[in-house]
Image: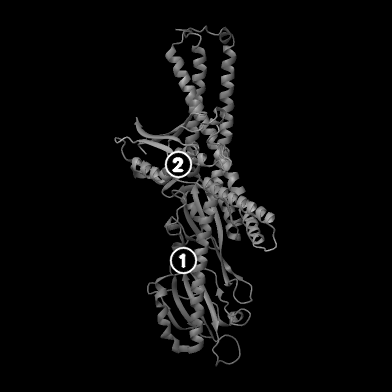
Amino acid sequence: MKTFPFPALLKKFLPFLWVIAVTLTLLIGVVGYSTSRQIQETITRQFNQQQLILARKISTHIQNQIYSLRNVLLSIQNLWELNGPASRKLFERYRQILAGDVLAILVLDRQGHPVWKMQDRDWNPGALPLPSPDSLSAYLPTPPAPDRIWIGRTFPADGRWVLPLAVPFRRPGDGPGGPQGAIVLLLDAIRIARNATAGVVSGHTGYAWVINPQGILLDHYEKDFVGRSIFEVRKARNPNLSYQLIDDLTRKELLKKMEGTSRYISGWHRNRQAHIEKLIAYTPIVFYEIPGGVGAAPSVPAEEFWSVALVAPIEEVSGMIRSLNIQQFLLIGIFQLLIIIGTGLLVFISNRWSSSLAAEVERKAEELKKSQEKLIHAERLAAVGSMASHVSHEIKNPLIAVGGLAQQLKRSPNLTDKDQNKLELIIGEIRRLETMLIEVRDFTRPTIPHKRKTALSTLIREIMALFSPVMQEKRIACQTQLDPRLPDFYFDPDQVKQVLMNLVKNAVEAMPNGGQLFLRTSQEQEQALVEIADTGEGIEKENLGQLFRPFYTTKKKGTGLGLAVSYKIIHDHNGDIQVESEEGRGTRIIVQLPLNG
């Protein structure tokens, strides 16, 4: 057993090594913390943007609902103008909307007194702050705004918050003057807001709330907040907390029709009362008396508007990242501590190293090298994939145009044979580039293995049946040895078939003058092995390390993507591909696939 003297310099410089190790630990900690903060801020911004998207969808839902009810109002107006009091029977068709968002339908005379009404049976309000028909003269159907309606402010009435919609009417036989009356829809604002936010959850526990211009909550997770001022309910729930930030945000942004994202401190969340930092995304809900695109008139927004906000605790976003960061720093600390302790222990460790330890170190180094190669290859695939996708997109359209022009020129009767040959060459090269672009597209397109339980031997027999005519033509003898004990296991048969066909095709092309192809399956521990060996030209030693690099090829007309795609597919299956080759004697490729899926 060979022994190695302990390096004397290591003892001398041991204190310096400890200082370096501690410095590296601190440096890694600082860099890791800074990176963690950047990642956390990025994810937080993305989460808030997702909340903003949800808020916009709620806003659009409510606007569409108001627009639908606006059309109902105009339909009732048309009926009354055409039929007068005789329309009351026709109005029965609208009774079903009372079970939805409408509390009442009113027909007012010129003095503003109801001459007909249909309302929710459970709602019996007193006097209602409705506009007089004369005040709605500007809303008479006249060009260029024939369908303008009045949208009033929300107001409380008999336990409900009501959003009024009205439109004046003038029958053709009425004399000159202002409106002869008005049609009014009274909408349940709380029900409209609640239906729009139903089922909306941001993150795990985030929720939405809606307020009107007076800061009255029309919907909230806390049901006892609904119908009350947002500024008052916060203080009543937890008076020990300052709500200056969210109150200012509400007044300066939400109640000013602003859209954006922010964060604030809350005193509770759902059923938990505590000091909680929350993320908020908000957007206005604008109502239009004249929607855009109606005739030649521009859109006219109403004075009434609502605002919707999505809120969620920031800990839902950062909690997981923080936990992972703590684990990361612990591992780094343990690793650096082991380095320091290991360096000190070297002083007391014997300088005799057994051959088994040397072999273990060599094995670990080889594993580390393979892991590093896999990582480098994965990064290279990602970078090349991004570049190739962009280049493929940019080249495809002009290439199609050039090919089309070449085809047109080829049909010209005035071309000489020499010109025809040149055009044939151009068209052939364009077709080759189009084929390459297709392979580049397939290479850059993300693929997920769709695994199902399949017999590998059956798949190989299908492949050999496909290549049998080619091998007979090229005088290639094939020997297969399929292990009958190899069980069926889960893999994507289409993707694995693509890989094996590519490898068999390469083996056949490596034997242009004939030869022997060996194909064998076996099982080693929890791995299924497929061995493909040929007696072809072999691969030069310096090229072996480049085989799976994208766009690397030794073929005159190859794209260099076949083996790169195959390597990616097998690694997506948690497998591996190993290559052994000797120039002039042939190549042996082993594909490893896990039996446990």
Q: Are marks 1 and 2 in contact (CB under 8 Å)?
A: no
- Characterize the local packing of mark 2: few (<14), some (14-19) or many (20 or more) Cα atoms within 10 angstroms: many
Residue 19 is marked as: none
The amino acid beneath tag 2 is Val
**If the image is split into quadrants, where does the N terminus sit?**
top left
The amino acid beneath tag 1 is Ile
Residue 395, percent across and down? 63, 51
Q: Quadrant of residue 408?
A: bottom right
Residue nearest the observer in this picture, 283 or 474 = 474
Residue nearest the observer in this picture, 524 or 26 = 524
Q: Nearer the viewer, mark 1 or mark 2?
A: 2
> Is there any visible trace of residue 244 in the rendered image?
no
Residue nearest the observer in this picture, 10 or 557 = 557
Residue 499 is marked as: 2
Residue nearest the observer in this picture, 61 or 482 = 482
Q: Secondary structure at mark 2?
A: helix
**If the image is split into quadrants, where does the C terminus sit?**
top left
Residue 197, percent across and down? 46, 59
**Disc 1 designates what residue?**
192
Instruction: From this view, report whether residue 443 is shown above or below residue 255.
Output: above
Instruction: From this view, report whether residue 146 is shown above or below residue 511.
Output: below
